[in-house]
Image (tube, rainbow, N blue to C red):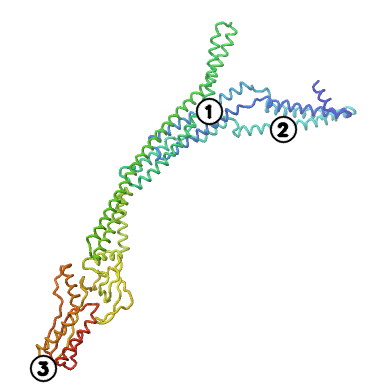
Amino acid sequence: MAARKLTRKSCAPSGYPDSVKFYCGRICEHLFLFVLFALAPLARAAPPDSFRSHDLVAHLEQVIAWYHDLNSIEPSAADVLMRDNLHQTSLKALQLAFQFAWAEDALIEAEENRRNPAPSGNLQQSSAKAAARVDAVQSKIAQIEAQLQKATGGKRELLAAQRDELNAELGLAKEIQAAVQNLVTFTGAIGSGGGTLAAQISELEQSVPEATGKSSGPAAPANGQKATASAPQFSTDSAGVLGLVTELFSIHSSRTQLEDRRNSTEALAVSIAQLEVPLANEARSAIQQSNQIVGQAGSQDAAQLRAAQQQLSALAGRFKQLSTAIVPLHEEGIAVGAGRSYLEESVGVLGRESARAGRYLLVRLATLAIVIAVVLLISELWRRATFRYVSDTRRRRQFLVVRRVLVAATIALAVIFGLVSEFGSLATYAGFVTAGVAVALQSPILSIVAYFFLIGRYGLRVGDRVTISGVTGEVIEIGFVRIYLMELAGTGPDLRSTGRVVVFSNSVIFQPSALYKQLPGIDYVWHTVALTLAPDADFQLAERTCNAAVESVYHKYSERIERQYTQVERSGDVHLDPPKPESRLRFTDAGLQYSVRYPADIQHAIEMDNEVLRALHDAVTREPKLNFAPSGTPKLQ
């Protein structure tokens, strides 16, 4: 009552009626009750040990991330047995981490309860009291309403004033009840949303079903084992340069992946050691306290012994709680250490494989370089020998072309065999590719084959006069696929260039149509000139006169023609009669017919033919015993 009177006097302003003072006092009283019942428990509650809770949650998140990292290692990064060991070790460490988390949660809760005992009132009690006060005020209003129906006069006015005061008090009580109920609802929402440490641990545990044994852990390694077993084993001994380079990149990637996992494992081991330090210190402190109590027990009375017994029992309970957290945490550290050993061993194995693959790669490259150097050396010796011992330009060109083809083919094969390791697959692939290329490039391939026939011993060379498919011309170039002719037109020996170039495929030599050309080294043709003398001409005189005329002209060109014949005799196995004029004399109805066949140099054939015709005409004209028959003058046939 003293408190109520003090509150009313301090809250009511002076100079107001007693009814206003009374209402103000009631309002202050209800506010005081609200603070007393609703806010006082929160003010007395000690804050939780958020630092240890935060470390514990961070540790669980780190272990879960580490577990997923180890189980995401690619099959190529470690062998089957190593991956299975890593999975089993990481799963064991994960389960021990949650065992430690639950034990640590119990330790934190017990410590908070010991330091901050539960208050006598809380929000639930405040809410119940606010509701009870609302009910009490409502019952009082009901009683006054019942009295008002029977009251009269001044008593009725007093009851009406009391009813109005209670209605105001009811409104305030309902406001207080609503405020307390909002606090209760908000606190419940925070608790149900995972704000407590136990809720966070439970939520993390549900995110990893393997930690509770709800999912089959070894399934992932088994699948990885099956995939690895089905993959072909890489053989460093028989691998080519490309295979070794690919393997080196693969080993580097796998090694980097394992080193990252090893670093995360070392970080986790450091975190476990840091978490283990305060627990170990507290356990040592409990042991020291127990030793001190036991040491002082001999000089104490019964009451002190009972107090010492209670202290020892408390220390034993606390030590038991500490051991339930220390043991799984220490075992977790051992499991993480085993995983680190497995990772270090895998990194070492990959390092040795990388060094071995690097050595074999250097050997392959050195071998390939030596082979190419030897081929180039032989090519250079071939070139020098060709220029030194082969004097014929055409034959020298042929040797150099063959040299280029063989050197290019040898180097290509050496590079292919050095780069590729699977020769069986390469041969099969090359067979299919060759068949397709042979069908698609039939004509070009046939032309390339014909090129080697054209440059053969009795083939074509630049400057030869040939006739191909009815076209006569001089060869100006012989390529791998085509042959180029300068077209010649005219009749008999009178052939002149038309200014056009005729292109034939080299495969024309495989066609049924004939290809005409002169023998190599021979650059002359056989021409025939005929004339007819009168029937009374002397046979012997006519023969001597005409032969002498032809010989006088042929003697001018005989040296060039005989030199060509000698060259053919030396370079070829074909036997030819020496080229010289051949004459024939016979009687016909028109008279005595004389014909002579003589070799004519192609470059001077026209000049030689004109001289032969003029010499025969002059010889017959000068001899009085010889006369031409009608229309019997010399003619070129």
Position in image of residue 622 (x %, y %): 16, 91
Position in image of residue 605 (x %, y %): 23, 80
Badge number at residue 179: 2
Label 1, on which residue?
A: 101
Tell me: 627 left or right of 279. Answer: left
Badge number at residue 536: 3
Mark 2: few/some/many CA within 10 Å (<14, 14-19, 20+)? some
Q: Looking at the rendering, which quadrant does residue 83 occupy?
A: top left
- Under mark 1, the amino acid is Ala
Position in image of residue 166 (x %, y %): 80, 29
Which residue is painted at 14% across and 81% down in the image?
Answer: 582
* Mark 3 vs 2: CB contact within 8 A: no
Q: Nearer the viewer, mark 1 or mark 2?
A: 1
Give the secondary structure at mark 2. Answer: helix
* Lower sequence index among marks 3 and 1: 1
Give the secondary structure at mark 1. Answer: helix
Q: Looking at the rendering, which quadrant does residue 196 occupy?
A: top right
- Under mark 3, the amino acid is Asp
